[in-house]
Amino acid sequence: MATGRTTVTEAAVREALGKVRDEERGGDLVGLGMISGLTLRDGHVLFSIEVDPQRGPALEPLRQAAEKAVAALPGVLSVTAVLTAHRGSGAAAPAAAPAAAPRAAAPGGAQSRKLPVAGVGSIIAVASGKGGVGKSTTAVNLALGLAALGLRVGLLDADIYGPSMPRMTGITGKPSSPDGKSLDPKENYGLKVMSIGFLIDEETPMIWRGPMVQSALSQMLRDVNWGTLDVLVVDMPPGTGDAQLTMAQQVPLAGAVIVSTPQDIALLDARKGLNMFRKVDVPVLGIIENMSYFCCPNCGHRTDIFSHGGARAEAEKLGCDFLGEIPLDIAIRETSDSGHPIVVSAPDSPHAEAYRGIAARVWAKLRSGAGPVAPRIVIE
Ligand code: ADP
């Protein structure tokens, strides 16, 4: 097992995976070209196993066998393997825009504003068609899930109408400025965080007019010393109005994740969110169903209050991926509202695991090129 400072190499991981067989296809995972998006960082290993969507759930044992084979290597601290549908099979990210797609469709000179942010790999938006569906809760736990995979992660609270990241990340105080021009992000739980809530009093109602929205976002994105990040998660304002559209145009997004509750009405709103991103050529990485079912805190009994499964069905209908479901559970509310999100306060809970699974799927999609600015990660 791991001794001292042994570091695992990509070659060693490939060799281990080369011994895992897909009996149905009569070969090993490497030989069959099923491994993609292999990422190594400080002993944390992440990869996708590309499979035929028809075989889906039946391949869970294969996924587990692959994780087990890699976990046995010296120097491996964690392994995350995710099953992803074959690209081109029709099930994988049909919403993805080709990397070189012209952006002429984005009005208002958006193309020129879509300059990459120095040092930041992929920027993803977490959005919802309407407020109160748990978008911010999902954004913070998704960011922490990505960090748990060993990635360098930033979180930008662009919800200028109701910034909740100071509360959810447990961060207080104003960010400092080393030079009077740029701001240093605040940090907690290994995340670099910027929120308009650090700069204005949460209780002070702000009226935002169009140009103010643009300049606030641009400053929070570009005048912040993010350093080197693999992913920047942007918590968008809820809804699909002008402000949201402007943001979707301004930020060089690698993709968007839509959070929805299972009620049909919310799903109609989710559809609007999806269309908004498609309009500005941002690939939709998938839909997350939040408050999917109710977990009784006393007996653990599960109740499908909101006709569970709506988002999965809707995602299929809309031709975008379903990234996972999170139950309605008081532990999720209490932890995020008190500044100790469940991914860090109860990392062994099934809910934390669900968020990490979603994070792994999102990262696998970014790595497999679902987004136009998926970066190359430095391999040890
Ligand atoms: P939004 O950003 O969509 O407005 P929030 O993330 O602020 O929504 O969530 C609204 C409220 O619902 C918060 O009090 C939050 O803690 C709670 N909440 C969000 N997701 C869940 C969940 N899965 N289970 C329980 N409470 C949740």
Image (cartoon, grey):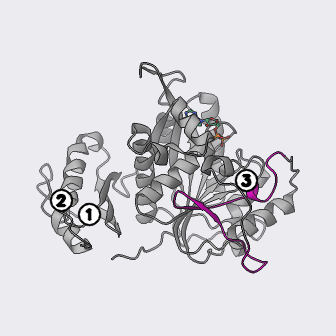
| Residue 18 in picture, x, y percent from top left | 15, 64
In this orientation, does residue 321 appear? Answer: no
Q: Residue at x 52, y 33 (%)?
A: 331
Q: Which three-letter amino acid code belongs to the residue tagged 2? A: Ala
Residue bearing mark 3: 244
Looking at the rendering, in which quadrant would you find the N terminus?
A: bottom left
The label on residue 72 is: 2
Height in image: 235 above or below 316? Answer: below
Q: Residue at x 60, y 62 (%)?
A: 187
Magenta residues span 177-203
The answer to which image quadrant residue 271 occupies is: top right
In this orientation, does residue 359 appear? Answer: yes
Quadrant of the displayed image that contains ligand 1: top right
SS category of the residue bearing label 3: helix
Q: Residue at x 14, y 57 (%)?
A: 20
Q: CA distance from mark 1 to mark 3?
A: 41 Å
The answer to which image quadrant residue 15 occupies is: bottom left
The label on residue 76 is: 1
Q: Is mark 1 within 8 Å of ligand 1?
A: no
Callout 2: few (<14), some (14-19), or many (20+) C-alpha neighbours within 10 Å?
some
Apparent side of residue 163 relative to residue 306 in the rendered image (left or right): right
Q: Foreground: 378 or 239?
A: 378
| Residue 300 in picture, x, y percent from top left | 41, 22
Q: Is residue 226 magenta?
A: no
| Residue 326 in picture, x, y percent from top left | 48, 37
